[in-house]
Image (tube, helix red, strand yellow):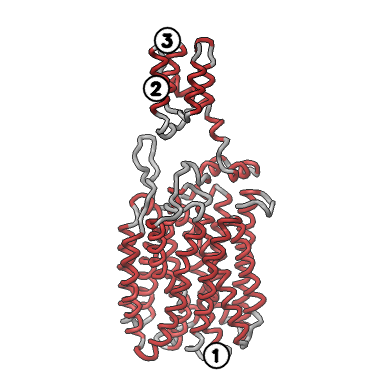
């Protein structure tokens, strides 16, 4: 054995525990070793391959051994690695294969591979579950309030805003959600680049401040500025980091983890209406808002302590982090799967916030006591809590898009088969509230993981916030449209039109998500996606 051969073998053995270098494969080394000048080096290469070595230093040593009298540049070695690249690409996701088979564009394919870098995820452990808990607390602050919007809508319409129309009052809640989702398009890239600390701290402060100032609000414009604008900005700063941090710690179990975190909105929607039912008659509106503000302070502590990032941001050819623009990257809509998913979220928001906002007013209009009707909203949110956990667990096993199609279908059925004919039947209303809460809660829990399935993990903030930007226009217009439709007819006719509008919106969302799934994996209902 020559000295060069001995050194090559030592290099392979010493590097067996090192991570593999991108671009170097055993088949490329073997093709070199079997050249006419290689001598008995083939045995050495076989031994190195059996030990799992694919280091570039071993490749260079083998080049020197195969032709001792020649010199090889790094460019020559790199060319050999590039010639071997197709064998590595064979290990990419099935979803990319199917997307190519069904005609997806080349840029869309490269962007859509969420496993492009194949990072390792903890999938559990103390740190990961503390992140989920922090996200849980942040989401209560955002969605616990909006899931209690029916209480505020009912109270405003009989107190401060008794002279305003239903459509005008609806703008208060639509504007809040519009700001949460639309401003989130700027927050998402900031989270991807700089982490969660600054947006979570600022968002927590604004949420608390909005409730404290809302307690002093008596006119329409004051409520708009405090509840909608200030609260919406705080919600936008909390929303993207709360979802995005989970994507840094979970992949295979992301549906379950996200579902657990999003139960917070349902729990807030159970607890806050009950608190307000007791406090509004006894303490009045100002102190009721202040108590909610103090609760938000307590929730802000674990949110700021535990929400964090783990994956490094994407880097450019120079090795420096790529600074993403704070404006939406509309080129990602070239991926038709993402485009149809985003459109589906738009129509889903159209259908969702009409019942969330008007269900208490509906019950009061059909003979039930307005204060007691607050419990109906708690029933809806109780169903939502279960809906965010169970389908998330099933989605990880049977496919995220598959499960969201089932839950959207259930929303259509409950709206048209239960709420539409409910009338003044308390039993029908309770059954509708629980089942619709289950189905709609499932949608909200599954949407982020469906979006995350279409992108690189490190760009989740950008993709999710872009999808929510599209949805923001749905939230902005849904409740005012519902209020306007309610005013078009008398009691029963007006409510019937509102319910049909919500059901039709969900039906269009179902068509959009079905299209996205077909583009990804074809028509087979058995394919996990």
| 10 Å crowding of disc 1: few (<14), some (14-19), many (20+) | some
Residue 86 marker: none
Whether label 1 touches label 3, CB < 8 Å:
no
Residue 10 marker: 2
Tell which circle, 1 or 2, labels the residue nearer the N-terminal end.
Answer: 2
| 10 Å crowding of disc 3: few (<14), some (14-19), many (20+) | few
Tell which circle, 2 or 3, labels the residue nearer the N-terminal end.
Answer: 2
Q: How far is disc 1 from disc 3 in space, using C-alphas? A: 93 Å
| Residue 253, x across and y down, in percent | 50, 55
Foreground: 325 or 523? 523
- Going 38% across and 46% down the picture, which residue do you hit? 313
Foreground: 225 or 467? 467
| Residue 73, x across and y down, in percent | 40, 18
Whether label 2 touches label 3, CB < 8 Å:
no
Residue 435 horizontal side relative to residue 267, left or right: right
* Helix, strand or loop under label 2: helix
Indicate the quadrant containing the N terminus: top left, top right, bottom left or bottom right: top left
Q: How far is disc 1 from disc 2 in space, using C-alphas? A: 83 Å
Residue that label 3 marks: 68
Q: Which residue lies furthest to the front in this view?
A: 1
Foreground: 135 or 416? 135
| 10 Å crowding of disc 2: few (<14), some (14-19), many (20+) | few
Residue 316's quadrant in the figure?
top left
* Helix, strand or loop under label 3: loop
Q: How many labels does the image show?
A: 3
Q: Which of marks 2 and 3 is in front?
A: 2
| Residue 303, x across and y down, in percent | 35, 64
Q: Residue furthest top?
A: 69
Q: Nearer the viewer, mark 1 or mark 3?
A: 3
Residue that label 1 marks: 368
| Residue 187, x across and y down, in percent | 38, 57
Looking at the image, is 20 positioned above or below residue 393?
Answer: above
């Amino acid at each position: 054995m020559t000295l060069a051969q001995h050194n090559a073998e030592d290099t392979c053995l010493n590097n067996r525990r090192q991570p593999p270098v991108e671009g170097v494969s055993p088949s490329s080394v073997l093709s070199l070793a079997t050249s006419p000048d290689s001598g008995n080096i083939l045995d050495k290469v076989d031994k190195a391959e059996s030990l799992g070595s694919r280091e570039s230093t071993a490749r260079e040593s083998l080049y020197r051994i195969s032709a001792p009298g020649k010199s090889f540049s790094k460019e020559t070695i790199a060319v050999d690695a590039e010639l071997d690249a197709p064998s590595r690409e064979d290990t990419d996701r099935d979803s990319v294969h199917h997307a190519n088979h069904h005609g997806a564009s080349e840029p869309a394919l490269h962007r859509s591979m969420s496993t492009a870098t194949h990072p390792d995820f903890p999938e559990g452990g103390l740190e990961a579950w503390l992140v989920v808990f922090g996200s849980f607390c942040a989401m209560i602050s955002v969605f616990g309030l909006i899931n209690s919007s029916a209480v505020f809508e009912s109270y405003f319409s009989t107190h401060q805003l008794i002279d305003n129309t239903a459509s005008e009052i609806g703008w208060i809640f639509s504007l809040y959600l519009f700001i949460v989702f639309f401003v989130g398009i700027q927050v998402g890239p900031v989270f991807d680049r700089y982490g969660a600390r600054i947006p979570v701290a600022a968002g927590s402060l604004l949420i608390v401040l909005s409730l404290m100032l809302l307690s002093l609000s008596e006119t329409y414009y004051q409520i708009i500025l405090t509840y909608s604008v200030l609260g919406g900005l705080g919600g936008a700063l909390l929303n993207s980091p709360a979802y995005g941090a989970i994507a840094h710690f979970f992949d295979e179990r992301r549906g379950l983890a996200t579902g657990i975190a999003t139960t917070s909105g349902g729990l807030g929607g159970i607890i806050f209406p009950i608190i307000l039912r007791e406090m509004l008659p006894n303490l009045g509106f100002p102190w009721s808002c202040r108590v909610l503000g103090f609760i938000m302070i307590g929730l802000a502590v674990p949110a700021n302590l535990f929400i964090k990032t783990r994956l490094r941001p994407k880097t450019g050819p120079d090795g420096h982090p790529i600074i993403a623009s704070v404006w939406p990257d509309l080129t990602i809509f070239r991926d038709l799967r993402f485009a149809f998913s985003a459109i589906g979220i738009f129509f889903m928001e159209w259908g969702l916030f009409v019942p969330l906002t008007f269900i208490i007013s509906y019950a009061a209009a059909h003979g039930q006591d307005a204060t007691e009707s607050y419990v109906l909203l708690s029933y809806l949110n109780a169903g939502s809590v279960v809906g965010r956990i169970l389908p998330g667990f099933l989605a990880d096993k049977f496919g995220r898009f598959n499960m969201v199609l089932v839950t959207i279908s259930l929303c259509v059925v409950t709206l048209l088969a239960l709420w539409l004919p409910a009338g003044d039947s308390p039993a029908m209303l309770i059954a509708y509230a629980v089942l619709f809460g289950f189905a709609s809660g499932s949608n909200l829990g599954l949407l982020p993981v469906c979006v995350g399935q279409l992108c690189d993990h490190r760009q989740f903030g950008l993709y999710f916030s872009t999808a929510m930007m599209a949805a923001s226009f749905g939230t902005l217009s849904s409740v005012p449209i519902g209020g306007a439709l309610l005013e078009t007819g008398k009691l029963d006719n007006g409510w019937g039109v509102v319910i049909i509008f919500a059901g039709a919106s969900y039906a269009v969302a179902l068509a959009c998500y079905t299209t996205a799934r077909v583009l990804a994996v074809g028509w087979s209902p058995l394919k996990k996606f």
